[in-house]
Amino acid sequence: MSCATSDLEVQEEEEEEGGGGDHEERAHLEEGGGGGGSFQTQPLRHDDLKEMLDSNKDSLKLEAMKRIVAMIARGKNASDLFPAVVKNVACKNIEVKKLVYVYLVRYAEEQQDLALLSISTFQRGLKDPNQLIRASALRVLSSIRVTIIVPIMMLAIKEAASDMSPYVRKTAAHAIPKLYSLDPEQKDQLIEVIEKLLADKTTLVAGSVVMAFEEVCPERIDLIHKNYRKLCNLLIDVEEWGQVVIINMLTRYARTQFLNPNINESLLEEGSGGDKTFYGSDEDEDEDEEEKEKNAEAPAMAKRKPYVMDPDHRLLLRNTKPLLQSRNAAVVMAVAQLYFHLAPKAEVGVIAKALVRLLRSHSEVQYVVLQNVATMTIKRRGMFEPYLKSFYIRSTDPTQIKVLKLEVLTNLANETNISTILREFQTYIKSMDKDFVAATIQAIGRCATNIGEVRDTCLNGLVQLLSNRDELVVAESVVVIKKLLQMQPEKHSDIIKHMAKLTDNIQVPMARASILWLIGEYCEHVPKIAPDVLRKMAKSFTNEEDIVKLQIINLAAKLYLTNSKQTKLLTQYVLNLAKYDQNYDIRDRARFIRQLIVPTEKSGALSKYAKKLFLALKPAPVLESPFKDRDHFQLGSLSHLLNAKAGGYQELPDWPEAAPDPSVRNVEVKDSVPEWTKCSSREKRKEKKVEKPFYSDSEGESGPTESADSESDSASGSESGSGSEESGSGSESVESEEGSESEEEEEDEEEKNKKKKKKELKKPVQESESEQSSEEEERKPERKSKQRKSDSESESDEEESESESSQSESEDSESEAEIKKKKKAAESKPPTKPVKKENKKEKKEMSLLDLDDFEPAPSPQVTPVNTFLSNSLVTDLEGLSLSDTVLSPATIAPSSALKNYELLHRITGEGLSVEYCFSRQPFSPDANMVAVQMQFTNNATSDTKNLHMEDVKLQSGMRVKEFPEIELLPAGETAAAVMGIDFCDSTQAANFQLCTHTKKFFVSIQPPVGELMRPIFLTENEFKKEQGQLMGMNEITEKLTLDAKCRNEHAIVQRVTTAANLSRVPCGSDKECSPPVPPPDHPIHRFAGRTVTSSSLVLVTVATKEEGAAQLTVNCEKMLIGTMLVKDILLALTQ
Amino acid sequence: MIHSLFLINHSGDIFLEKHWKSVISRSVCDYFFEAREKAVDPENVPPVLQTPHHYLISIYRGKLFFLSVIQTEVAPLFVIEFLHRVADTIQDYFGECSEGIIKDNIVTVYELLEEMLDNGFPLATESNVLKEMIRPPTILRSVVNTLTGSSNVGDTLPTGQLSNVPWRRAGVKYTNNEAYFDVIEEIDAILDKSGTTVFAEIQGVIEACVRLTGMPDLTLSFMNPRLLDDVSFHPCVRFKRWESERVLSFIPPDGNFTLMNYHVSSQNLVAIPVYVKQSISFFETGPCGRLDITIGPKQTMGKTVENMMVTIHMPKAVLNANLTATQGTYTYDLTTKVLVWDIGKLNPQKLPNLRGSLSTQVGVPKPEDNPSLNIDLKIQQLAISGLKVSRLDMYGEKYKPFKGVKYLTKAGKFQVKMLCTAHFSTNWRSEYI
């Protein structure tokens, strides 16, 4: 020590001689330019600090140290103070000491010699009776990165690893990776220490030692065997950071030790065929291959012996599951990836909910979680489908989150939900965030390629976007359209024409290039336009961007090959321009193409094949997710996020072909008793207390270890172990764990059962939801009243409320049981039927969106064009179409009701009179049109010829399907015809000219609002549900007094259905209210329909009250239609 | 694991650095600054960046970037969650997490960082443990410290560090024993332009303030736990009790903490407390538009809606707004194009209305994009899901504590897509994709 002090003095003298400046420069150099602020440090102030440090007063020392640490924190260089600071390492004041430690750890590496002076202090600290001091001494000692002290550190770590205090042992575990990074040669010795600490039974040490294991020897998986069960059981009590590390490590461990739980399932799937669609048919090809390989080897074996999950595998899954409820996102993610990589397919679903929960966390958490969800959705789409709406985008989301959510939505899209997703996408296109809009357009493109049914719809939508004002939107659309068209070009020559026109306006190079490529590729579809485009392009060639120039050359070459007559000169011109271009790529291309296509005497054999080369069929591009195949990285890892292997990443091994010996995990009792428990001290007793997992539930958790211990000695232990494990789980399920749990347990269930389960899963949750919600509704008033009661009572007088609450609790639990029963009943129903229904429903919903593809097939009714159907027949047919639903008095259709309107009066028509009515039948050529039945009467004395329509004037969006020309209408005769008008859900008139061979008459047809809809069938419940969603502005209510003549049900129904083309909603047909209820005094009549064009719901409710008073409610998405309809119905009911 | 931490302020200055292993030069941050510039918005900086030798993982909190430097594989969420925990701790200690506060307490922050990580691996993150080692500054203590020269650093090992209940220290004593719970629910919803609910759900949180002597063991039970669909707990809550009995059984941390977060099952229809009638239109000709918003109560369960506030992000082309509000005040920020209408209490008799004209940039075509409208509100004494705490029992201690439960409903991410019209007919057409 005396030697040390003298050294110090020498150092100080040197410093005084050399002056501060010199010193600083050296330090600065050593820092590698790191301390940007080091120039500002003033030697003068440092002298000040030195003085303070040398003083006897602790307060002064403290002040100085605080200032020095503040300097370090700001990144300023304080290394020249090292000698002055290090003297205080033995200071009695604990705060000064701590700050000195902080300083030492920061600068020791730079001033190794001086740092050595402090070592003895720490060595003394290691022997201190206070565990805090022992731990902190070890912590600082191991943090000093000086190679000379490696042996000292090694010794200290070894000693601390068998310290009595678990806190010191934890510190020892932390010190291991520090020493390893300082000197990797110590690995073998360190592994010994790790092995020892892994056997530690306290939760405090577990996380830290596994961390050390991961950094030092992640490949020594054999060290885990004996500790596997203990780690599983301790897991729930380990602190959260340790949990993450342990779970990630155990995932890897399990992959090496257990069999693939899905191996049988995949076999089954292949056997039954087609059943695979559950998790999306786009099961990874690679995996398929892999599985096939395995299957090829394993089938005989696997068929003989059904897969039984190793009880240890089950233990891991069971013990990690509750951690999905952790508040720490990293823990949740760790469990999620464990389930994704290790659990049987049927069980993976549990993680979806937890991951969706994380989406409400900070945006950085969302970012990471969404990346992982995106990868998962490719493999296991079914898992997240019920949470589709959670991925809807908010305008306040950051762009990077929006884009990721889009990715997930796109991955989730399938035939059933695509209409909803596309509708959502429509709103995104109007966003102000242009990057996001571009991403949306690409997403639409991907949906279109993945789901054939909507390809045309998407294409049409994208074509509409071409007229968008924003150039970026247009450009992105062009690029996507190009890709889509490549899949079926022959059908879309008009789109290609349209795009050709765009070349005049679009400036974005990528888009221009795409258009040119398209025209060139499909020039035979647009033989007239293509040369003209080339002409224009030749004109602007010199001003174009490089990618555009290349495509112009391409276009020229292709045209030359197909249509050389018209384009020969143009091509030569373009090639000449390109020959002198500045860009050598373009010059090269021009030269190459000239040689290839223009036959000269020198041209080689290749030119014969020029046509083949250029006009070969090109495969359509595959638009795939950037997240495809990412799951070969362990999910949740940095490598997965970056899609590149990060340093120190441990590959997730493939499942083994055959399970390694499970008995390696059996633990012998004697070994597991650590040495330190033998010594007796006060602390020891404390520790014993700690040892017993205090906080985990006392019954189950400690059990398995013990049982594992007891079963250990026999070789057949594993067998008996599995038995006990199984029975354990059984009893658990008896303990009213949730039903789902017990289901999971039964792994070796029959195949059929499995399939059934799957099918049930397949149904979206909605099914049960609706069932429940109806119940919920029933119960609501009850609950409300309860709430109010308890509200009124103040919280303080507990006695009363307690008794009450306990009562209500029991009630609650009862009802819960009821629900469970019902659920079960629902589940036990044969699954096929509801599925069918579901499908149907979805079909219906499709038609909500006016996507051409989903137009319901025109109903079987064939409307004879020239004859009137009798009204009664109409109603008959209507009844027929509803026959699979409950027939009720509801469908009373207007019996005599069709009202005739005059289109052309006899006098103005010079003898020709025309009347029309809305026949209320589907117009079969186009379901979006309203059928108008016209009746022509020739009152004149001469024949009328060539009766047809002309010069139709319409508001934008409206369309008309003309009636077929009537060639001859003899005098005194009558003829009928049907035309269709798409009013676009507006009451705008359709104006046109009615022409005969001699005259033209201007006429117009204006529909009453009630004719703009068609009836649909809804049950009362559906009606209420829909009505619930159309509240607020979509609801219009009027009070009225019913006309004296229309106070009975029949009259009301008739008047309403006359006024509007709606169908009656049967009341009381719901099976829930089984006892026949006497008709109430004041019935409520409900009517439902959809508008013809946009299929928006129109719901009308007439609630009658006393003495003819009534309330009319109209719910309609289209507010305008709603208001007009209210007026019309009001009129019909009051007159 | 976590190698270094840099705290960076809004203008890109590094004002604190801490290295847990060897020193890494500040220049790594240049990669971050580059990304920061590219992203325009601080929220759009990718949280994970790759540089030739390091990985940078950052979070953005309170206008500060917490940037950590990583060298080897580590779960990114692990780091992100930890960085947020650092920010939480700073907030817990000093009341807020801002550049000024951190600079004022730089030594304490540095000491905290030293305790929170050891060699890059989290060591002590429970605020209870940290507070025993490094005492949070109070006015009284700082006065005493300057007089006596005593320190902020505790000299005993925090008992929490050793026990299996690391969130609670031993020997807590209060003269008034009290336990208060706040049930706070947030409605997240997206309503489309016609007022139909596209998406709605309820998020809840139970914030607790527990000041109880000794080691109390509490059990909190609900009247209707079935409502809770998805839950996450403070580590103190026993999972298994919840699984089997649906009660929250826990030894509480001392002081304020978040007991649980929950999500109300989506089977229940979410009551939307207000409705909004709105229209915004821009004329094809002339530099102006019109705005009309009315708000009314819908399903409020008989409670009054308070602290109503409407925020609209206007299209870029809108220059100014000239509006009249029948209630409350409105402001229009010309640079960010954000219209804020602070309404206050919602009076069901006289519905608040905001209408008037918007002036748009001349020569710029009428904005096509629809702005959306965000709503803030509060309803006291109501948990909109209907969740109700039925009782709180205490075991393990003899005294009788004061107990209380408060309910509050707030709007979370409550968004209404606006109706933007020029003519009715074009609007209809736009519905087709």
Image: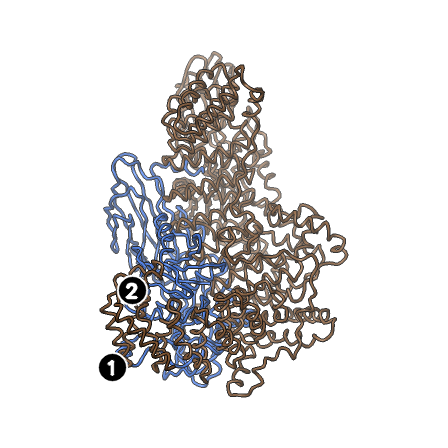
Residue A437 coordinates in the image, percent (x, y)? 41, 42
| Residue under pointer 2 | A24
The front one of A192 and B341 is: A192
Would you place residue A72 above or below residue A1133 in this image? below
Q: Does residue A505 appear in this view?
A: yes
Residue A773 coordinates in the image, percent (x, y)? 52, 57
Q: In the image, which lettered chain appears blue?
A: B
| Residue under pointer 1 | B147
The figure's colour scheme reads by chain
Would you place residue A453 above or below residue B251 in this image? above
Residue A125 coordinates in the image, percent (x, y)? 43, 81
- Residue, x 36% and y 44% (percent of image)? A432
Q: Chain of mark 1?
A: B
Q: Chain of mark 2?
A: A
| Mark 1 Cα shell of 10 Å, populated few (<14), some (14-19), many (≥20) | few
The front one of A1003 and A400 is: A400
Would you place residue A521 above or below residue A387 in this image? above
Residue B237 coordinates in the image, percent (x, y)? 49, 72
Say which mark, if any, is on residue A1043.
Answer: none
Q: Quadrant of residue B64?
A: bottom left
Q: CA distance from mark 1 to mark 2?
A: 35 Å
Q: Colour of chain A?
A: brown
Discs 1/2, front:
2
